[in-house]
């Protein structure tokens, strides 16, 4: 018999995927999501939806997955001894959008739930998720709007929630080998089970439901900004850093591959085009060089002037 907590979260996530795809299709204004359902032989499956070559989105995806099994991979249970000998369910929705126009940021988000059971013992469960923004040509007003919405999603749950999960996002989405953040951050939380299930589930819904409010105005403001081949080349160079993070540091990618998830869905987050150039750096005093000032943790909501590169 399915756990009632699991079924409630799963119903919400499936509905969230539908709402995101409907709104993002309207925002794109030209493309549409194609859907694939897939099964995982070890248990579970998912519903992947991908948009390519749209009017706004060069590539994007909104994926639902529900994987389960009698035991976790040894690497996972070794890191969490309390999960040894437990069956598990992991359910979530993740989304990544790579707009064509370099003035529109790449954006990523996910909300997820994990529960593990063992006969005669209480369930072990937690929530995780968040969203983060990766601009190429950053605008301070966009970054501040993004963080205002993120803070508003957190505020009903305590004054300390936004600062804590904002800082966690800055720490998590950090490319240690480059000494820079992946973008301008947002929210990140994991292992959330303090308090009741109802409180934690309400917080997850608040985060998931606030994403469109955070992203849509930014995309609408920047989608018509002119760009050319120069801007596209810089975008491709910066997308290379996005790939580096996902393949080197991202725990979700690692868990998905180790747990036998669908590779195409896991790597959906990759941009359609990226480039690497040996020791390339933007020229000083250019708009491309200005991005560097955005790639360190900062209190965006109290920032009053455009950040400047050192």
Image: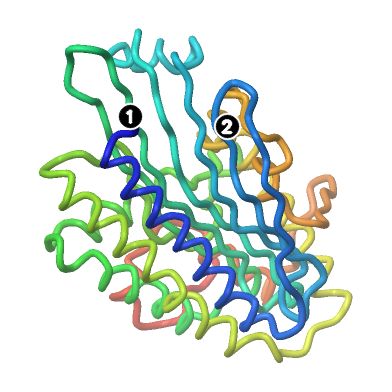
Image coordinates for residue 33, horizontal then vertical, percent: 71, 66
Q: Is 167 in front, or is 302?
A: 167
Residue drawn at (40%, 14%), measured in percent from left and top? 77
Say whether marks 2 and 1 touch (CB < 8 Å).
no
Judge whether residue 189 can be spotted in this image.
Answer: yes
Question: Can you say whether 216 is above or below 241 in the image?
Answer: below
Q: How is the image coloured?
A: rainbow
Q: Is 64 in front, or is 222?
A: 64
Image coordinates for residue 22, horizontal then vertical, percent: 57, 75
- Quadrant where the N terminus is found in the figure: top left
Number of labelled discs? 2
For marks 2 and 1, give the CA distance.
25 Å
Callout 2 crowding tier (Cα within 10 Å): few <14, some 14–19, many ≥20? some
Pick out the residue farthest to the right.
Answer: 229
Q: Relative to 300, is 105 on the left or the right?
A: right
Dot label at residue 256: 2
Question: Can you say whether 169 is above or below 106 in the image?
Answer: above
Dot in front, 2 or 1: 1
Q: Quickly name the residue at label 1.
A: 1
Q: Is 242 in front, or is 1?
A: 1
Q: Relative to 60, is 135 on the left or the right?
A: left
Among the 4 quarters of the image, the one containing residue 220: bottom right
């Amino acid at each position: 018999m399915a756990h009632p907590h699991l079924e409630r979260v799963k119903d919400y996530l499936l509905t969230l995927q539908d709402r995101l795809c409907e709104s993002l299709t309207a925002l794109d204004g030209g493309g549409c999501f194609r859907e694939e359902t897939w099964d995982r032989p070890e248990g579970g499956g998912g519903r992947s939806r991908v948009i390519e070559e749209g009017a706004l989105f060069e590539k994007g995806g909104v994926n639902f997955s529900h994987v389960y099994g009698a035991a976790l991979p040894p690497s996972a249970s070794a890191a969490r001894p309390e999960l040894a000998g437990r069956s598990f369910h992991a359910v979530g929705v993740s989304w990544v959008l790579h707009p064509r126009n370099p003035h529109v940021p790449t954006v990523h988000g996910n909300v997820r739930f994990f529960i593990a059971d063992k006969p005669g013992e209480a369930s072990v469960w937690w929530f995780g998720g968040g969203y983060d923004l990766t601009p190429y040509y950053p605008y301070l007003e966009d970054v501040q709007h993004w963080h205002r919405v993120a803070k508003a999603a957190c505020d009903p749950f305590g004054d300390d929630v936004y600062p804590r999960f904002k800082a966690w996002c800055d720490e998590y989405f950090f490319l240690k080998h480059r000494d820079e953040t992946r973008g301008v951050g947002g929210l990140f939380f994991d292992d959330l089970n303090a308090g009741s299930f109802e409180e934690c589930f309400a917080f997850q819904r608040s985060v998931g439901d606030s994403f469109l409010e955070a992203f849509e105005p930014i995309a609408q403001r920047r989608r018509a900004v002119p760009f050319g081949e120069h801007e596209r080349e810089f975008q491709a160079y910066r997308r290379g850093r996005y790939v580096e993070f996902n393949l080197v540091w991202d725990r979700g990618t690692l868990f998905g591959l180790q747990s036998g998830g669908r590779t195409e869905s896991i790597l959906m987050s990759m941009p359609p085009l990226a480039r690497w150039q040996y020791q390339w750096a933007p020229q000083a005093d250019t708009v491309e060089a200005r991005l560097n000032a955005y790639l360190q943790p900062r209190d965006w909501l109290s920032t009053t002037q455009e950040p400047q590169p050192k």
